[in-house]
Image (tube, helix red, strand yellow):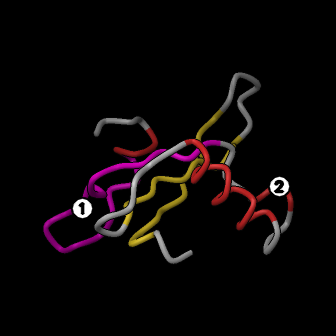
Amino acid sequence: MRSVKKCVVVGVPDKANLEKPQAFVVLKDGQVASSKLGNELQEFVRSRTARYKYPRQVFFVEELPRTSTGKIQRFKLKNRQL
C-alpha cells in the first residue's frame, strides 16, 4: 500500500497457544494511523494471501527495533517491548 513505509509480521501465541500473525507498521511521512487504515491493510493482505496468513491485529509504530547490524529485533515486537 502507498501509505506504508515498512512493515513486519510476527507470530504471537493466543489464549489457545496458537500462533496468530500481528503486523507492526511504520507509515510514510504525512500518513495518519487509524483503525480504518488498519482494517484496509488487513483486507489488502487477506485478498492476496491465504486467509489464515492475514494479521489479526495491526499496530502502528514510529520505528521498528533493530540491532546494530540493522536486523529487526522480532523478539521485542513479539513481547511488545517497544
Residue 59 painted magenta: yes
At numbered mark 2, what does the secondary structure look like: helix, strand or loop? helix
Provide the residue span drawn in magenta.
Answer: 57-75
Q: Amino acid at mark 2?
A: Tyr
Magenta stretch, main secondary structure class: loop
Which residue in the protein does label 1 denote? 66
46 or 11, nearer to the observer: 46
> In the figure, 17 relative to 61: above or below?
above
Residue sticking out furthest to the left: 68
Of marks 1 and 2, which one's residue comes earlier in the chain? 2
Residue designated by label 2: 52
Measuring from the top left, give residue 60's x and y in whole percent.
42, 48
Q: Name the residue located 24 percent from the left edge and 61 percent from the top edge.
A: 66
Whether tag 1 and tag 2 are in contact, CB under 8 A, the answer is no
Where disc 1 sits, the SS reads loop
Q: Position of residue 11 (x, y in %)?
A: 60, 48
Q: Quadrant of the N terminus?
A: bottom right
Q: Position of residue 65 (x, y in %)?
A: 26, 55
